[in-house]
Amino acid sequence: MPPPSILTVKFDADSFGFFDLLRRKHFPPERNFLAAHITLFHHLPGEEIEHIEDELMRICADYEAFELHFPALRFLGKGTAAEIESAELIKLRSTLAARWEQWLTAQDKQKFKPHITIQNKVAPDEARRLFEAMRASWEAKTGNAVGLQLWHYKGGPWELANEFTFGNAAHE
């Protein structure tokens, strides 16, 4: 059976660089298998990848790049994340969730709270210290969603399966 698929948002290079640097600096290196990412779905059926890719090609061709706002940080208990506000992102995810409802796991059926994890899986007191330090100097940021990325889950690391650029996004 093929590995499950994970769907993330591809965001602009400047925002990616900023958040990836924070993640590399603060995420425990022995647990950090991934670059900064915005997960839309954690577990889509790998055996349906052709259907999923066809759907994503259609949607992304008709979708336009849109803004992502990073207004504040969220304390995760054992880490810190940057919150994301974007009506377009919520709409896109809701559209896909409705189309793929039969495949969604309990985790992917939960209320969608978009974020980028900066630190996770550390002791709560260490997590609290970073959160408070970052919150004290945090300045809201804005970036852009430019497409979607589909990944194969490999038991820790992910392997890129395909990228789908929004119709009006500049190719990077």
Image: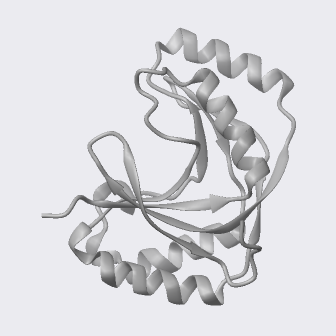
Would you identify the image quadrant in which residue 19 lies?
Answer: top right
From the top left corner, tell me how far across and down residue 100 is, in percent.
Answer: 36, 78
Residue 21's place in the image compared with 39, above or below, is: above
Quarter of the image for the C terminus: give it. Answer: bottom right
| Residue lying at 87% horizontally and 36% vertically, measured from the top left | 139
Q: Nearer the viewer, residue 12 or 136?
A: 12
| Residue lying at 56% horizontally and 11% vertically, measured from the top left | 126
From the top left corner, tell me how far across and down residue 87 is, in percent.
Answer: 70, 69
Single out the residue that lies furthest toward the left. 1
Residue 7's place in the image compared with 129, above or below, is: below
Would you identify the image quadrant in which residue 22 lies?
Answer: top right
Would you identify the image quadrant in which residue 151 lies?
Answer: bottom left
| Residue lying at 65% horizontally and 12% vertically, measured from the top left | 129
| Residue lying at 60% horizontally and 44% vertically, measured from the top left | 116
Left/right of residue 26 with respect to residue 2 in the rendered view: right
Left/right of residue 133 with respect to residue 80 in the rendered view: right
Left/right of residue 82 with respect to residue 58 in the rendered view: right
From the top left corner, tell me how far across and down residue 105 is, in percent.
Answer: 28, 61
* Coloration mode: one colour
Left/right of residue 106 with respect to residue 12 in the rendered view: left
